[in-house]
Image (cartoon, rainbow, N blue to C red):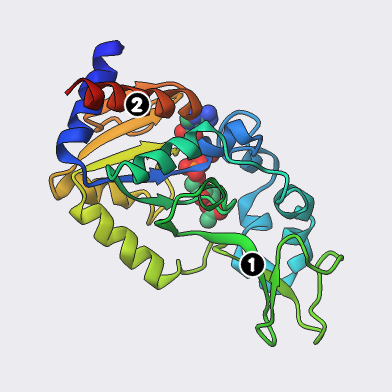
């Protein structure tokens, strides 16, 4: 295991040009449930009912019945050691950017500067009628909540059946195609188009380092088994030790 950390750290120091693709697993240690693990959200709530754009447009109260889960605690969720480790890697000029599928805003809260939120963020809620913006958690009560103009409010997040924000996915593809290492962290890597990004990176010559409690991407060049909040700080420490010794 120590050798694996050393190998990964040395590869990251030598190649730099590293990009991270994160999923719900990185926020698990912040107390936010994942989607597909045992006890995950989609085991309790059918995403095609609670998180589909078609259902939302017909009956937004389904989605908003989960508002306490997503929005009420927004300010209480804090970044964990994994988010801070990615911020450190960016400051060390090894990590170019974080592409995240998460809507919790924790990479930004941790201080990462170059964050691409391909599924949007619950930071911002907007009115479907007049486009007025509201900042979480300061949004009107109600299931669903309504804007002062009477329109229904919707978070700026991607629901099933919706297009991803074009600029974000374009940037994410560009970063994936041009990086030399992709850290694949805490994602089941099955939801497209996000799941195509590691393949895109690999096809263009990048090495993939998977960090997960369970292997989800068998084609990874390196797999470090463990919680992101344990593994990532250890990678940062190993990089620091190697660079100090040089
Ligand atoms: P999933 O719930 O599908 O997968 C979570 C992954 O994190 C699994 O592979 C777990 O093994 C791993 N994991 C759990 N705890 C971990 C920890 N502490 N450290 C490291 N790994 C851990 O979540 P995503 O892959 O993010 O989309 O799901 C992708 C998309 O599906 C989400 O963005 C969301 C969902 O539907 C939208 O809402 C559009």
Residue 63, located in which quarter of the rendered image? bottom right
Quote the CA–CA distance across marks 2 and 1. Answer: 33 Å
Residue position marked by numbered label 1 in the rendering: 124
- Badge 1: residue crowd in 10 Å (few <14, some 14–19, many ≥20): some
Q: Nearer the viewer, residue 246 or 166?
A: 246
Is 138 displayed left or right of 169 in the figure?
Answer: right
**Residue at (44% x, 21% y) in the render:** 226
Residue 8 visible in the displayed image: no
In the figure, is residue 22 to the left or right of 127?
Answer: left
Name the one closer to the observer, 206 or 93: 93
Answer whether residue 12 is visible to the viewer in this image.
yes
Q: Residue at x 38, y 71 (%)?
A: 167
At horizontal 36% and vertical 48% (from top left) the residue drawn is 195
Q: Which mark is residue 142?
A: none
Q: Is residue 7 above or below residue 48?
A: above
- Choose top left, top right, bottom left or bottom right for residue 60: bottom right
SS at mark 2 in the image: helix
In the picture of the structure, the residue carrying the numbered disc 2 is: 235
Give x and y (percent) for residue 65. 79, 56
């Amino acid at each position: 295991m120590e050798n694996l950390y050393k190998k990964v750290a040395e590869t990251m120091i030598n190649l730099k040009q590293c990009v991270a693709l994160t999923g719900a697993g990185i926020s698990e240690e912040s107390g936010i449930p994942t989607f597909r693990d045992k006890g995950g959200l989609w085991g309790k709530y059918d995403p095609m009912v609670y998180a589909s754009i078609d259902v939302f447009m017909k009956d937004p109260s389904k989605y908003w019945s989960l508002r306490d889960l997503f929005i009420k605690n927004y300010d209480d969720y804090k970044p964990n050691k994994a988010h801070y480790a990615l911020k450190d890697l960016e400051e060390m000029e090894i990590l170019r950017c974080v592409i995240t599928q998460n809507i919790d805003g924790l990479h930004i809260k941790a201080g990462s500067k170059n964050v691409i939120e391909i599924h949007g963020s619950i930071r911002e809620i907007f009115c479907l009628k007049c486009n007025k913006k509201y900042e979480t958690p300061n949004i009107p009560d109600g299931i669903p909540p309504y804007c002062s103009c009477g329109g229904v409010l919707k978070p700026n997040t991607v629901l099933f059946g919706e297009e991803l924000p074009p600029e974000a996915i374009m940037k994410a593809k560009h970063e994936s195609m041009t990086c030399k290492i992709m850290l694949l962290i805490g994602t089941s890597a099955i939801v497209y188009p996000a799941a195509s990004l590691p393949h895109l990176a690999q096809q263009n010559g990048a090495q993939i380092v998977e960090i997960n409690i369970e292997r989800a991407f068998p084609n990874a060049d390196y797999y470090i088994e463990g919680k992101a909040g344990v593994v990532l700080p250890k990678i940062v420490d190993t990089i620091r030790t190697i660079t100090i010794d040089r």
